Image: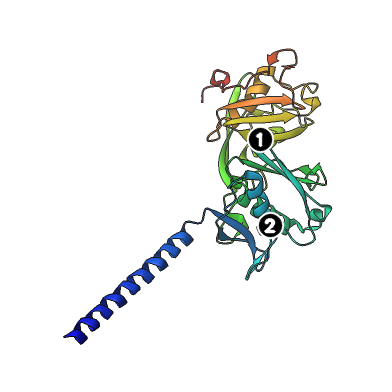
């Protein structure tokens, strides 16, 4: 009888151990599934992006940024680091939800295709951090330029599936812009379908297309082509468009209000943007051609749009 009791107790003990072991495995698996972040890398052929789950236990924003930058420098099995060994990170700073990362001059030795993938991996990784909405790149303290064009602050939506890989984001979309009508008396809706905005944010793309002018008959350009753009950034649902000094000196062939509201109405066709703040070299307390006050963010004005 005693032998039977011992045998029974042993069975119970084994069952308890098995249940406890299974519980531990489940807990570990649960923790694994609850990784907070993803760190992005280039795939082995450097033709697309892939990612690895990352917990990132640091609570301070600056320490978390540094830990991400450290991870982005690592090569893993079947994955290539987004920040190669020949590129140093000089430092970073966060101002108004824009994280600026400063790289060494080695950044400019990346091939064009690889540079875009590296930039996408860095932006998609760092933009996950709370309090960081956009990522801006500088090289030795100077804003990054690719093919002579300034690269504005970016978020994950600045990149797309054209990069391939299992983790990719979109770079094509339908846009609605506002140019002047044929006789320049009102704004007219201009549809730009399946447009490729790779390498820039949607807001940047809109401003760039307004500067390049319409390609369809029945429309008149609103912005002089010589106008320079310093920066296009969105923070807290307000898009900030900062122009160079010649925004105030170059004269459009259409009325001043059509110039301003071609910008404002076009940008406000984008999701999650509620107002547009136009500045010149960072200053907003100005009038456009002594006519339109730019001190405060502007809302859309559909009264200037002709009926379809």
Q: What element carries label 2?
A: helix
Give coordinates of residue 33: x percent, y percent: 46, 60
Give coordinates of residue 279: x percent, y percent: 71, 25
Residue 191 sits above or below residue 197 on the image: above
Residue 106 sits above or below residue 6 on the image: above
Q: Which residue is drawn at 68% across and 30% down?
A: 241
Give coordinates of residue 302: x percent, y percent: 54, 21
Label whose residue precedes the other's in the sequence (1 or 2) = 2
Q: What element carries label 1?
A: strand
Horizontal relation, residue 90 to residue 117: left or right: right
For label 2, count other residues whose C-alpha is less than 10 Å away and answer few (under 14), some (14-19) or many (20+): few
For label 1, count other residues whose C-alpha is less than 10 Å away and answer few (under 14), some (14-19) or many (20+): many
Residue 78 sits above or below residue 299 on the image: below
Mark-to-mark CA distance, 1 and 2: 26 Å
Task: State if disc 2 and disc 1 touch (CB < 8 Å).
Answer: no
Q: Which residue is drawn at 66% across and 45% down?
A: 62
Horizontal relation, residue 278 to residue 51: left or right: right
Which residue in the protein does label 2 denote?
70
The reply to whether residue 15 is visible in this rendering is yes
Q: Which residue is drawn at 55% across and 41% down?
A: 174
Instruction: Count numbered badges in the picture.
Output: 2
Q: Which mark is residue 13?
A: none
- The figure's colour scheme reads rainbow
Give coordinates of residue 131: x percent, y percent: 60, 40
Which residue in the protein does label 1 denote?
233
Q: Nearer the viewer, mark 1 or mark 2?
A: 2
Q: In which quarter of the image is residue 75?
A: bottom right
Q: Which residue is drawn at 69% across and 28% down?
A: 221
Q: In which quarter of the image is residue 115?
A: bottom right
């Amino acid at each position: 009888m005693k032998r039977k009791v011992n045998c029974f107790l042993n069975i119970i003990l084994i069952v308890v151990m098995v249940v406890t072991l299974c519980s531990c495995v489940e807990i570990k698996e649960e923790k694994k599934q609850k990784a907070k972040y993803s760190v992005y890398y280039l795939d082995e052929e450097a033709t697309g992006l892939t990612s690895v789950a990352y917990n990132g236990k640091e609570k301070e924003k600056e320490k978390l940024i540094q830990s991400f930058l450290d991870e982005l420098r690592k090569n893993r099995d079947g994955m290539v680091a987004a920040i190669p060994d020949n590129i140093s990170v000089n430092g970073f700073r966060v101002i108004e939800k824009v994280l600026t990362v400063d790289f060494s001059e080695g950044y400019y030795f990346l091939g064009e295709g690889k540079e875009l993938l590296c930039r996408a991996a860095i932006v998609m990784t760092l933009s996950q951090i709370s309090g960081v909405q956009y990522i801006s790149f500088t090289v030795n303290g100077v804003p990054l330029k690719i093919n002579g064009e300034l690269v504005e602050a970016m978020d994950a939506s600045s990149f797309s599936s054209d990069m391939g890989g299992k983790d990719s984001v979109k770079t094509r979309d339908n846009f609605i812009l506002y140019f002047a009508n044929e006789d320049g008396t009102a704004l007219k809706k201009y549809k730009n379908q399946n447009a490729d905005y790779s390498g820039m944010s949607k807001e940047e793309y809109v401003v760039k297309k307004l500067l390049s002018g319409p390609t369809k008959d029945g429309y008149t350009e609103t912005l002089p082509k010589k106008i320079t753009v310093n920066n296009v950034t969105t923070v807290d649902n307000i898009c900030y468009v900062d122009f160079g000094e010649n925004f105030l000196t170059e004269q459009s062939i259409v009325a001043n209000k059509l110039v301003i509201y071609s910008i404002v109405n076009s940008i406000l066709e984008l999701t999650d943007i509620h107002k547009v703040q136009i500045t010149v070299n960072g200053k907003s307390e100005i009038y456009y051609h002594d006519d339109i006050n730019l001190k405060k963010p502007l809302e859309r004005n559909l009264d200037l749009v002709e009926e379809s």
